[in-house]
Image (tube, rainbow, N blue to C red):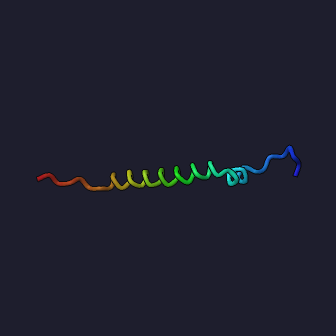
């Protein structure tokens, strides 16, 4: 491999621990937040006395 050739994008991503840390926090946070919003929309309204 030449010195001028950059490694593939996926290799650069996997070699950077800070990007992996950010992705490891953001992806679960966003997915669980979206899941919570979906669950809230599916809750039937409470009957009033």
Residue farthest along the left direction in this orientation: 49
Task: Judge by depth and name the residue closer to the eye, 10 or 14.
Answer: 14
Residue farthest along the top direction in this orientation: 4
Task: Judge by depth and name the residue closer to the eye, 21 or 37.
Answer: 21
Relative horizontal placement of residue 5, taking residue 49 as reference (left or right): right
Q: Residue at x 86, y 43 (%)?
A: 4
**Which quarter of the figure has residue 46?**
bottom left
Residue 45, horizontal then vertical, whole percent = 23, 53
Number of dots carrying numbers: 0
Relative horizontal placement of residue 49, taking residue 34 as reference (left or right): left
Residue 28, horizontal then vertical, whole percent = 50, 55
Residue 22, horizontal then vertical, whole percent = 57, 49
Residue farthest along the right direction in this orientation: 2
Residue 2, horizontal then vertical, whole percent = 88, 48
**Which quarter of the figure has residue 11?**
bottom right
Q: Residue at x 55, y 54 (%)?
A: 24
Q: Residue at x 29, y 56 (%)?
A: 43
């Amino acid at each position: 491999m030449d010195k001028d050739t950059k490694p593939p994008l996926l290799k650069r991503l996997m070699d950077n621990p800070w990007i992996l840390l950010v992705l490891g926090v953001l992806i679960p946070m966003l997915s669980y937040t979206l899941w919570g919003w979906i669950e809230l929309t599916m809750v039937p309204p409470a009957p009033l006395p």
